[in-house]
Amino acid sequence: MDSQQSVGQSIYRLFPDAPELTQLVSHALGGNGMEAVRFNLGEAVYDGWFSPLFDGQNQLVRIICVILPT
């Protein structure tokens, strides 16, 4: 899948076999700071960064995620 197809998609849908990502998304949803992880999917290795994004009232509105092949 290329990057244009993955923008806005659920991380759970894109990487269903990567439990490391589920843990990081949960951590970010808790309002914690940016997290990073390296994970394997089959033969491919990826680096991922996750950060919570807040509105003006300090309410969590979404998680920003960047995942790149290494």
Image (tube, grey):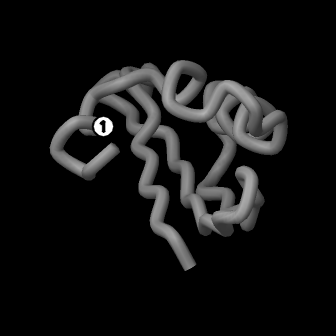
- Which residue appears farthest toward the left when viewing the image? 4
From the viewer's perspective, is residue 33 above or below residue 17? Answer: below
Q: How many labels does the image show?
A: 1
The secondary element bearing badge 1 is classed as: helix
Pinpoint residue 69: horizontal percent, then vertical percent: 51, 70
Instruction: Please tell me which residue lies in front, 34 or 36.
Output: 36
Q: Which residue is depicted at the point 40% across and 43% down? A: 64
Q: Is residue 35 left or right of residue 1?
A: right
**Quarter residue 12 falls in:** top right
From the viewer's perspective, is residue 70 above or below residue 7? Answer: below
From the viewer's perspective, is residue 37 above or below residue 15? Answer: below
Badge 1 amino acid: Ser
Circle 1 Cα neighbour tier, 10 Å, few/some/many (<14 / 14–19 / ≥20): few
Q: Which residue is depicted at the point 65% across and 64% down? A: 44
Pinpoint residue 21: horizontal percent, then vertical percent: 71, 40
Q: Which residue is depicted at the point 75% across and 59% down? A: 39
Q: Name the residue under label 1.
A: 6
Q: In this view, does 7 lie to the left or right of 57?
A: left
Instruction: Please tell me which residue lies in front, 50 or 38.
Output: 38
Tell me the quarter of the image containing the N terminus: top left
Q: Which residue is depicted at the point 71% across and 63% down? A: 43
Q: Is residue 25 left or right of residue 65?
A: right
Tell me the quarter of the image containing the C terminus: bottom right
